[in-house]
Image: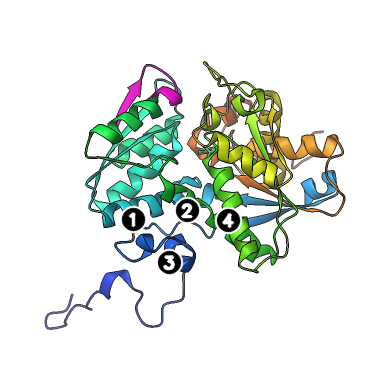
Amino acid sequence: MTAGTAPPSPPPSGAPTAGATRQWRGVVAEYADRLPPEVGTGTVVTLREGGTPLIHSQGLSQRTGCDVWLKFEGTNPTGSFKDRGMTTAISAAVTAGARALICASTGNTAASAAAYAAKAGLTCGVLVPRGKVALGKLAQALVHGATVLQIDGGFDAALSMCRSLDESEAVELVNSVNPYRIEGQKTLAFEVCESLGRAPDVHVMPVGNAGNITAVWRGYHEEHAAGRTAGLPVLRGYQAAGAAPIVRDQSVENPCTIATAIRIGNPASWGPAIAAAEESGGSIRAVTDRAILSAYRLAAAQEGVFCEMASAASIAGLLELADAGELTAGETVVCTLTGHGLKDPDWAIAGAATPPVIAADVDTAAQRLGLRDVA
Ligand SMILES: *Cc1c(COP(=O)(O)O)cnc(C)c1O
């Protein structure tokens, strides 16, 4: 810096300088008037989550006869929709004077809580099922400085421990049993309605702990009640066949699926999820791991969207609905792709051949890339 030149004074409270173009502000600022007042009036802890793309799918539209859109939540700051609920839950917690957060997680809640806790200067404790968390999610929780404990048990046991700690200790629970989580996550429905200019006819999404289907239904309901949309979508929720307590009407002791983010045997929002599906005229069903894996590959190879395994349950569900003749031609369908595939690249790599090694030679490369006819 040149001597005598005063440094530019920083803009107050992170506000943009004059002449800056507008950027998405995060779900609390964008939807302050539709969230509980205690979320937006105190400290707002945000990484500018939300504002995610709604991507039209020509391939899936052709295959189903519908107008299919993918709401890709993998572009959120920590790579999943959990950020929508974490900004509201942690903003409310900070405003109420909390110093420490806790959550149980299959991975994404931990990643999100850890990042927002770091931003807010709070401590964050995370209980995860031992050996069942995707490496990328664990990496996120660790690099953001959370204290991670692996539980000898599943997600359900971890959540039950967190509920006890929430009662006995001075700590704020930020799982989706925290009502502010649901409030934040409902904003996905607002964005979908704004992007489409209407509510979709059908909304397909994965179901794990069942907070998100509860939240999305609330969002659509509020849009409708406020007169911003004329209709309400039919909700189609999908569990993994090996972790389908709602479908089987009985909790699952040892849930088992490659879609670890929905590997949950006793969903916290079980009742509200059933109510949401029923009120919408929809359903909660199961898709096999085989169907999930094939949808995961289709999304990446044909749509250019790398989502995680649990997210692909919505595309698997969409294809099942189409095959069963349960979609009406021309309907507008939205599939939530809940998280980013980079969190768990093992499955992508496992399904592909190891790239061959060649000499650093242009002719060889051209031939191996199929750019030249082999004589
Ligand atoms: C949390 C999560 C789900 C399940 O959402 P629920 O609210 O628990 O039903 C699905 N997919 C991904 C990627 C998630 O992180």
The magenta stretch is 145-157
> To which residue does mark 4 refer?
219
The residue where tag 3 is placed is 29
Q: Which residue is mark 1?
A: 91
Residue with the mark numbered 2: 183
At a point 39% along the width and 64% down the height, the residue shown is: 37
Q: Residue at x 61, y 50 (%)?
A: 217
Looking at the picture, which amino acid does disc 1 mark?
A: Ser
Ligand 1 closer than 8 Å to label 1 CB: no
Separation of marks 1 and 3 at Cα, in angstroms: 12 Å
Question: What amino acid is at disc 3?
Answer: Ala
Q: Quadrant of the N terminus?
A: bottom left
Give the percent coordinates (x, y) of residue 118.
28, 48
Amino acid at the residue labelled 2? Glu
Q: Which mark's residue is nearer the viewer, 4 or 1?
A: 4
The answer to which of marks 1 and 3 sits earlier in the sequence is: 3
Residue at the spot 80% in from the left edge and 50% down from the top edge: 61
Foreground label between 3 and 2: 2
Q: Secondary structure at mark 4?
A: helix
Crowding at label 2, few (<14), some or many (≥20) Cα neighbours within 10 Å?
Answer: many
Query: Residue 164: x percent and y percent?
Result: 31, 29
What colour-coding does the image apply?
A: rainbow
Q: Nearer the viewer, residue 187 or 139?
A: 187
Tell me which amino acid carries mark 4.
Gly
Is residue 357 among what the camera can see?
no
Residue toward you, 11 or 94: 94
Q: Secondary structure under badge 1?
A: helix
Magenta-colored stretch includes residue 156 = yes
**4 or 3: tag closer to the N-terminus:** 3
